[in-house]
Image (cartoon, helix red, strand yellow):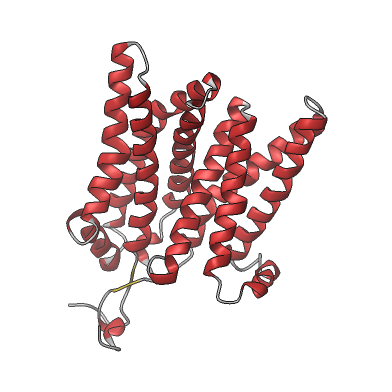
Amino acid sequence: MKSYDWMVDYTPQTTWIEGHGIFIWLAEVFGTLGGGLYLVALWSNSMRGMFIGWLLVVAIKGGLHMAHLGQPSRFWRLFLKPGSSWLARGLVFVALYALFGALQFILSYWLPGTGWEVLFKMLAGILALLVVAYSGFVMNYVNGIPFWNSALLPLLFAVFGILGGSALLMLIGLLGDDADLIAGLGFTPLLLPVSASLTALYVWSATYMGPAAKRSVMELLKGRLALPLWIGVAFCGVVVPVGATIVMYGAGFVPVFLLVVTAVGIVVGVFSFNYCLLKAGLYRPLTPVA
């Protein structure tokens, strides 16, 4: 690419998906899965699921963000701008989630069933939802990439987060807790069609957001991103889990193999969904494109 191409042609964003930016993609995915797992486990009262979800956000997502920073010792400065930066708000959400989640685990161990435990479960749950959805708000705030300028993005992240969390809870349940398995399996038939419909609606609506967003859609449907979209999101994330779920309900029993296939397919779909969103982002040029 010539040095001036960004002025006259659509330019892919690379900061959050290529090179060192891979850490951003992975942090986004683990934040989505961890927060979603915490929410589903909170609904089913699975302490093991809640703790693993908390670890995914605090340890893995937080560690990946720190690895991406050029000067990690200065990250605290983001706390100073929550009123003007979604990145700063996201850092606040993660920090409060880490705190409230830790307090909730302490109260669940020492004071189970008390009002304090219920309060901190509610607070941690609210923060977990914000952690899941805030990536959508961050991307929506980037005005130079029209493909991301949709109010559906935070909702999409929330739905994919809860769907991915359900898949992880199913895998956790396979380790010996039938309640986790049943809870995770109960969410997937509802959320699979919702996530597929919202994704289709988002892609369709993007064609009306201007030439740059329409170009992003073309890259997804039949360009350089067609493979991760159709194989990763559509086939692995929707077709395989839906097919496995239909077979399980039709057979009247739940084979372990099909459970694993369903859960792994959904997780692959969440990774692919985040990858496609970040990779499809195109900056509009300064001059009109013929």
Closer to the camera, 217 or 236?
Answer: 236
Residue 28 falls left or right of residue 6: right
Q: Quadrant of the C terminus?
A: bottom left
Position of 113 relative to 240 (above/below): above
Position of 247 relative to 278 (above/below): above
Closer to the camera, 247 or 2?
Answer: 247
Total number of numbered labels? 0
Image location (x, y in percent) of residue 75: 64, 70
Q: Quadrant of the N terminus?
A: bottom left
Closer to the camera, 207 or 60?
Answer: 60
Image location (x, y in percent) of residue 65: 55, 63
Q: Quadrant of residue 281?
A: bottom left
Residue positioned most to the front:
175
Closer to the camera, 135 or 71?
Answer: 71
Q: Which residue is pictured at 46% across the width and 56% down the height?
A: 26
Q: Is residue 144 visible?
A: no
Q: Which residue is pictured at 29% across the width and 12% down the height?
A: 251
Residue 5 falls left or right of residue 14: left
Image location (x, y in percent) of residue 125: 64, 39
Q: Which residue is pictured at 33% across the width and 24% down the height?
A: 245
Q: Quadrant of residue 233?
A: top left
Position of 269 relative to 188 (above/below): below
Q: Is residue 240 visible?
A: yes
Image location (x, y in percent) of residue 10: 27, 74
Q: Which residue is pictured at 47% across the width and 62% down the height?
A: 24
Residue 186 falls left or right of residue 199: right
